[in-house]
Image (spheres, rainbow, N blue to C red):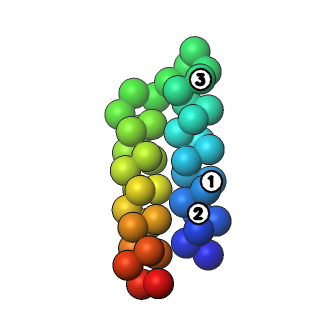
């Protein structure tokens, strides 16, 4: 479940970087959330 959410957030972040329309801070917040979810998953094993 966490992996799926993290993947979706990373994809949304990449789309935000590639597209000409960015939401500013929201794009980076999505990236931070995705990284935190991945780290939590790795720590939990």
For residue 20, which quarter of the picture? Answer: top right
Q: CA distance from mark 1 to mark 3?
A: 15 Å
Name above or below for residue 13 compared with residue 42.
above
Q: Which residue is mark 2?
A: 5
Q: Nearer the viewer, residue 11 or 39?
A: 39
Separation of residues labelled 2 and 1 (CA atoms): 5 Å
In this rendered view, identify the residue nearer to me: 27 or 43.
43
Label 3 with label 2: CB-CB less than 8 Å: no
Residues tagged 1 and 3 counted as in contact (Cβ below 8 A)? no
On screen, residue 29 above or below 35: above
Q: Which mark is residue 8?
A: 1
Q: Earlier in the sequence, mark 3 or mark 2?
A: 2
Position of residue 16 measured from the top left corner of the image (x, y, whole percent): 55, 30
Residue 37, x across and y down, in percent: 44, 66
- Identify the secondary structure beneath mark 1: helix
Name which residue lies at 61% across and 21% down.
19
Residue 9 is left or right of residue 27, and the answer is right
- Residue identified by numbered label 3: 18
Reply above or below: 40 against 15: below
Could you tell me which secondary element the residue under label 2 belongs to? helix
């Amino acid at each position: 479940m966490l992996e799926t959410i993290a993947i979706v957030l990373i994809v949304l972040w990449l789309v935000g970087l590639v597209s000409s329309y960015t939401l500013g801070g929201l794009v980076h917040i999505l990236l931070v959330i995705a990284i935190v979810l991945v780290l939590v998953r790795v720590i939990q094993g």
